[in-house]
Amino acid sequence: IGYFRRTLQRYPGNVTADDAHLYLCLALMETGRREEAVEELERFTRRWNRSVYRDAARYWLGRLRLEIGLPGGREELEGLVADSPHSLPASYARRLMGLPAWRPEYTDEPLEAWMLRNGLEPASPSQAALRGRVLVAAGLRSWGVAELRRAEDRLGSPAPLGPFYLASGIWERMPSAAWRMWSLADDGTRPRELWELRYPEAWPEIVVPVCRRWGFDPLLAWAIMKQESAFQPACYSSAGARGLIQMIPSTSEYVALENGWGGYSPDRL
């Protein structure tokens, strides 16, 4: 706890400080100092309006208030659900309050019809796009994606190729195409195919059986892939993380040794 307090004092305006501040709150909770944790969580939510951890802090603040019997607990959780309905902390808040889980609103309108209705004409795949699909299907994904990006550059956006990517199962480019057209309509009329384009169940022939074998939820696996690499198998980070789920090579080597996997190489990430 002292370490986290010193970090806050040393880096008051740095992103490191909101990390330390959240861990200070968690440390107080873990050591049974729940009243102090409530006070610190209140400070956190006031101080870090743009922190990626703010929703989590609001969840724990509301939950602790309820558990301790302090006022405002349910109101805090209801505010979290209203302000960040799609977030994981909001999902936990709904469960805690006995509310139904969030579900997306969508229609069965074909994606291409929805695009045309909202002023975006789907593009017929160019020769570059067709070459890209062939290369991706042959396992030469980096070269294939490069061709697809050339096709997108000529169109000025990946969005017109969205139906082509959806039909072809080109996971790398699907979320980008969907993101570009996401704001065309926000009235509950987005088609199911647009949701599938933005949140694809990528490589199901690999993900589903592996998750079943290890008792892992494939939805969580896909969520990690989307967040960490946007489904880019060759993705690298400045910290050295690699692959769809952005594992650090040293961590993956440890996992391979622990499980007795032979022939391991970081290139397999």
Image (tube, grey):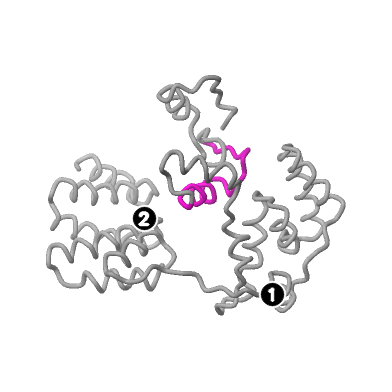
Q: Where does residue 69 sit, x and y in percent of width and height?
A: 12, 67
Q: Quadrant of residue 174?
A: bottom right
- Whole-angstrom CA distance, mark 1 to mark 2, is 35 Å
Determine the residue positioned at 30% across, 43% down: 10
Q: In the picture provided, is 233 more to the left or to the right than 257?
A: right
Q: Is residue 95 above or below residue 240?
A: below
Give the SS element for disc 2. loop
Mark 1 and mark 2 in contact? Answer it, CB < 8 Å: no
Residue 123 inside the magenta-drawn segment: no
Q: Nearer the viewer, residue 171 or 183?
A: 171
Q: Secondary structure beneath disc 1? A: helix
- Residue that carries the numbered disc 2 in the rendered image: 53
Foreground of the two, 40 or 102: 102
Q: Amino acid at mark 1?
A: Trp
**Residue 124, image x, y percentages:** 83, 62
The percent position of residue 136, horizontal first and vertical second, equals 74, 43
Find residue 141 and report its horizontal and vertical position in percent.
71, 40
| Front-most of residues 237 and 267 | 267
Residues in magenta, as a range: 219-238
Q: Quadrant of residue 187?
A: bottom right
Q: For this view, does 243 lie left or right of residue 219?
A: right
Quadrant placement of the N terminus: top left
Residue located beneath label 1 in the image: 114
- Does residue 244 appear to the left or right of 173 in the view shown? left
